[in-house]
Structure formats: C-alpha cells, structure tokens
Image (spheres, rainbow, N blue to C red):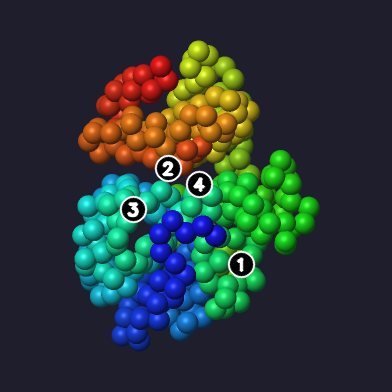
Amino acid sequence: MIFVKGSEADFIKFVKNISKKDKVAIISHNDNDGVISGILLEKFLESQNISPVSINFTDIKVGMLDKFTSEFKTKKISKVFISDISIDTIDSESFSKFTSEFDTFLIDHHPLNSQFKDSPNIIKTDDGFCSGYVMYSLGKNFCNLDDLILLTCTSIISDMVYKTDECAKFIKKYYPSFNPELVAESVPGKLSRQIASSLIYFVGKEKKVYEILVLGNYKLLEKYHKLVDEEIQLWAKKFDNDAESFPEKKLFIFSIKPKFNIGSIVATIVSLRNPESSVIVSYPLDKNFLRVNARNQSGKKDMNLLMKNCTKGIPLASGGGHPKASGGRVPIKDFDIFKKRLLDGFE
Ligand SMILES: [Mn+2]
C-alpha cells in the first residue's frame, strides 16, 4: 500500500493509547466504502477490547462535524476515528477545531490538504486505494478479518480502485474468476451494487445497512436493490434523449429529478457508456441544494479540479474528489454561476 502520510505504526500507537476510561466514537462516510471501513475498524477495535460507543455514517459537507461535536461532548467521548472522509480538504477549519477538542485519528485515501502535512494522527494513502482496503490491511495482522473479505472486495469495487494492481490481486485471490472488464458479473460486484442501492434506499438511516452487513444478512439487500435499480435504469435510459450535449467540449450535462438519491450511479453508468467525455449529473438534494456528480473515465479531464474550480467561493458550495470521479454540492440559486464556470472550464 502507498502511504502519502502516516503509517500503520502511527495507527497502532494511537489504538494502544486508548485506555479503559476512554469513550470511543467512529465517524465514517455514508457510502459503501465508508460503511465497510467502519465495520472493519469496529471489528479491529473490538479485537483490542475497545468497544466504540457511537458509530456514525455521514454525508460529506461543510459543517458536518458540528452535530458530532455537541453530541460527543454530551456523551463524554474522548477518542474519535474518522474514516473515508476528506475532512481536511472539505472543512479544514472545523477539522482543526475538532482535533483540538477530541483526540482524533483520520484514515482516508483522498488527496491530503498540505496544511496538515505535519499534523499527527492522519493516515492518507494514495487514492488508488479505498478506505475499506486500507482498514483491512491495517487490521489483518492483529485480528482475523476473514469474515469481512467479501465486504472489503465490494469497497474496492464501489470506489473503483480495482485497477490498482494490489487491489486487483486481493480480489482475485479470493474470487479468481474476477474480471475487471465484467465487474458487475462477479460475486463482490453484485453485492457491491446491492449495498449501494440499499444505502440509497435508507438514505439518512445508513446504520440500517450497517446492521444488516454486520449480521451477514446480505440476502436481505436484494429487495432494496430491485426498487432502486429500476429507478436508476429509467434515468440512465433518459440520458440519451434528455442530456445537454456539448460535442466540441466532449461534455454532457444531465439534470435529473429521481425518486431516490441515484445521481452518482447514473453518472457512473452513462460515463462508462461515454468514456471519452465528461459527464455532469445534477439533481435536487432538498429545496436549497443540488448535488452534482462529475465523471471522466478516460482521465483526460480532471474532475476533482473541475469541481473545486466551479464551486470555489460560492457560499455553502463544496466540491472535489478524485480525478475520474468527483462531486459537489451547489445552492440551487447559484447553479447558473456553477454552470457558466463549468462550460468555461472546457475552453
Ligand atoms: Mn472511499
């Protein structure tokens, strides 16, 4: 594994310093990789006789730590693990404040905000790895995580890091017929989609999915997947007629109003069909905000930079992620500014 910052030794040292008097909390991302890295982390901590008293899955946005600060103070939490959240970039100010109030360890694979390059208790790996795989690798030498290998494989697939040699080898070791060109056919590929659908179905109550996965009741996810998948296929089909196309920019902009929160998956599906183009999918999150998902499978246009540039300075907007897959949150009233910047970004 390629560490950009921190090491296994840093992580183990932090864990060994947790005493019986400490109360431990976990905050992880509410996507597949976040939930699974949270499950792996919890299992590892349990093996070290540490039982987290609070496990939380959250959307990534500015101010996201606020509610945890007050809740954790009430619960007298003293140690916090944050997993799969690029909090150092999304909300650096809150992150600094939070780490001054709680002894915090961050494990993440999104690019490091250089402001924190000398800060302790941060593991950042290269973004060719996902948090599930990072957590599995950190824990496997200290406890038996065999039961969670399938889930670890699904996190690799959902974060699309199976093209990284080490991650591909990991999946192939346990699922020898795994073919990166036919991900959806594989056992972890299928489960990955069922988890993704279930997280969408239970949006805001992701803990429900976490509970199903912890108990190993994977079969239960099938019915949620069916409901959500029908809606995904509907919008993926509409793309062909309804997306705005800018051929000279190799760009598609697709505004949708789906029943579930499926913009990210629709963006991935239609971008895989148009690998040389950039695809931007937007949909209302609530009455004030739009969620934007940006994809470019070829890697020829950096979606992380694009989303950062398009949201920069817009109050309450945020954006960023990976070069090939990124996202943002934009106030509906500022979408015109965002869209103009987007089109200008392809001159
Ligand atoms: Mn991730």
Q: Nearer the viewer, residue 47 or 254?
A: 47
Pick whichever of labels 1 and 2 is earlier in the sequence: 1
280 displayed left or right of 168: left
The x, y position of residue 61, in whole percent, is 33, 47
Residue position marked by numbered label 2 in the rendering: 321
In the image, which is nearer the foreground, mark 3 or mark 1?
A: 3
Mark 2: give few (<14), some (14-19) or many (20+) Cα within 10 Å: many
The x, y position of residue 316, in whole percent, is 25, 39
In the image, which is nearer the foreground, mark 2 or mark 4?
A: 2
Residue position marked by numbered label 3 in the rendering: 87
Pick whichever of labels 1 and 4 is earlier in the sequence: 1
Q: Is residue 108 visible?
A: no
Which residue corresponds to the image point at 45% horizontal and 34% vertical from the top-left? Answer: 303
Distance from disc 1 to disc 4, alpha carbons, whole Å, reads 22 Å
The x, y position of residue 237, in whole percent, is 61, 26
Quadrant of image for the C terminus: top left
Distance from disc 3 to disc 4, alpha carbons, whole Å, reads 22 Å
- Tag 2, which secondary structure? strand
Residue position marked by numbered label 4 in the rendering: 200
Pick whichever of labels 3 and 2 is earlier in the sequence: 3
In the image, which is nearer the foreground, mark 1 or mark 4?
A: 1
Pick whichever of labels 2 and 4 is earlier in the sequence: 4
Label 4 CB less than 8 angstroms from ligand 1: no
